[in-house]
Each structure stands twice: as structure tokens, then as C-alpha cells.
């Protein structure tokens, strides 16, 4: 089974930029109800999509005060627990982060390792790619970040 996830967040001054559980030095960070980690949000949506279990907003609504400033790794842990309860196994993860600045190449491996650890998945099954939007659109104007994620899951044998 394949799942696709997408997330985007507006960028603003005085906020932290957290991607894949890693704090990235930046003058702009994500504006969000939780910590705004668009990578982990897209990953959760891909997991929920592959398992036909809704989306991140259904599981962790931004109207719930208990998720205010929440570390998004708790959402991913819950998604992984749901997979286990459904007798499903995460096989691989492919993430594309689209952000004009800062450049993410120095952080991709750390993000990859963190996601591998959070998902208890071998490193060779986690792919992290970073792109700019060639100065086009809201991402190109450094107004936001967006992330695409694809996962494969299988029934446990």
C-alpha cells in the first residue's frame, strides 16, 4: 500500500524552523498550532493515507489546546502505534522538502537519521530531498515551506 502526504506552513520571524525533528538555524520559522514540523506532518499524512485512516487533522486537530506548541514527534509516534495496531509495517519513506532558504543540504542527513530513528526504520529506507522553488510562488518568496512525502506499508506476516 502506498500513501502520499503533503503539508505546508507559513514562515514568520521569531519562530523556530523545525524539519524532521531537527531545529534548523534560520531567521524565519513556521507559524503553526504545534511546532510546525511540515516534514513530520506530511509523513503522518502519508502513513494515515496508506492505511486509509484519515489525516493528521482528524487525529490531532489544531482546535485542541493540548496540541498547542506540541512536538510533532508525538504525532509520528502515534501514527506508528496505529500502524502496529492495524498489523501494518512501514517499508520506506521518501520526502521532498521545498524551501527557498536556508539551504538544507547541511541538514538532510541529520533529518534522515532522525526520521529513521523515530520510525525504527533502517536508514537505507529513508530518503530526504531538498529543493527550492526557483523563486516562484509563496515558497519562492520565502513566505512558506511545503513538503511532499510518499510511504509504502505492508501487512505484517
Image (spheres, rainbow, N blue to C red):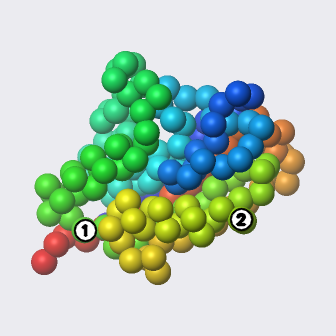
Position of 55 with respect to 97 (left or right) is: left
The picture places residue 37, in percent across and down from the top left corner, at: 53, 43
Disc 2 vs disc 1: which is toward the camera? 2
Position of 136 with respect to 4 (left or right) is: right
Residue at the (47%, 28%) spot, across then down: 69
- Seen from the viewer's position, the closer of residues 25 and 152 is 25
Residue at the (28%, 55%) spot, across then down: 80
Tag 1 residue: 89
Residue at the (51%, 58%) spot, across then down: 149
Location of residue 41 with respect to 64 vertically, above or below: below
Instruction: Give the quadrant of residue 96.
Output: bottom right
The picture places residue 34, in percent across and down from the top left corner, at: 47, 31
Q: Classify mark 2: helix, strand or loop.
A: loop
Looking at the image, the residue that sits furthest to the right is 135
Q: Classify mark 1: helix, strand or loop.
A: strand
- Residue 122 appearing in the image: yes
Query: Residue 106, which numbered label?
Result: 2
Q: Reading the chain from its start, which is encountered first: label 2 or label 1?
A: 1
Location of residue 61 with respect to 129 vertically, above or below: above
**Which part of the image, by quadrant, shows the C terminus?**
bottom left
The picture places residue 112, in percent across and down from the top left corner, at: 53, 67
Cα distance, mark 2 to mark 1? 30 Å
Residue at the (65%, 62%) spot, across then down: 107
Amino acid at each position: 500500500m502506498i500513501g502520499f502526504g503533503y503539508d505546508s506552513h507559513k514562515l514568520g520571524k521569531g519562530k523556530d524552523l523545525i524539519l524532521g525533528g531537527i531545529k534548523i538555524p534560520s531567521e524565519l520559522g513556521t507559524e503553526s498550532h504545534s511546532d510546525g514540523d511540515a516534514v513530520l506532518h506530511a509523513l503522518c499524512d502519508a502513513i494515515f493515507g496508506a492505511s486509509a485512516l484519515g489525516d493528521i487533522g482528524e487525529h490531532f486537530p489544531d482546535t485542541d489546546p493540548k496540541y498547542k506548541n506540541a512536538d510533532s514527534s508525538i504525532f509520528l509516534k502515534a501514527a506508528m502505534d496505529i500502524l502496529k495496531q492495524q498489523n501494518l509495517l512501514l517499508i520506506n519513506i521518501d520526502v521532498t522538502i521545498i524551501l527557498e532558504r536556508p539551504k538544507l543540504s547541511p541538514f538532510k542527513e541529520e533529518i534522515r537519521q532522525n526520521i529513521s530513528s523515530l520510525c525504527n526504520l533502517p536508514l537505507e529506507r529513508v530518503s530526504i530531498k531538498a529543493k527550492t522553488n526557483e523563486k516562484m510562488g509563496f515558497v519562492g518568496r520565502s513566505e512558506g515551506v511545503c513538503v511532499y512525502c510518499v510511504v509504502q506499508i505492508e501487512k505484517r506476516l
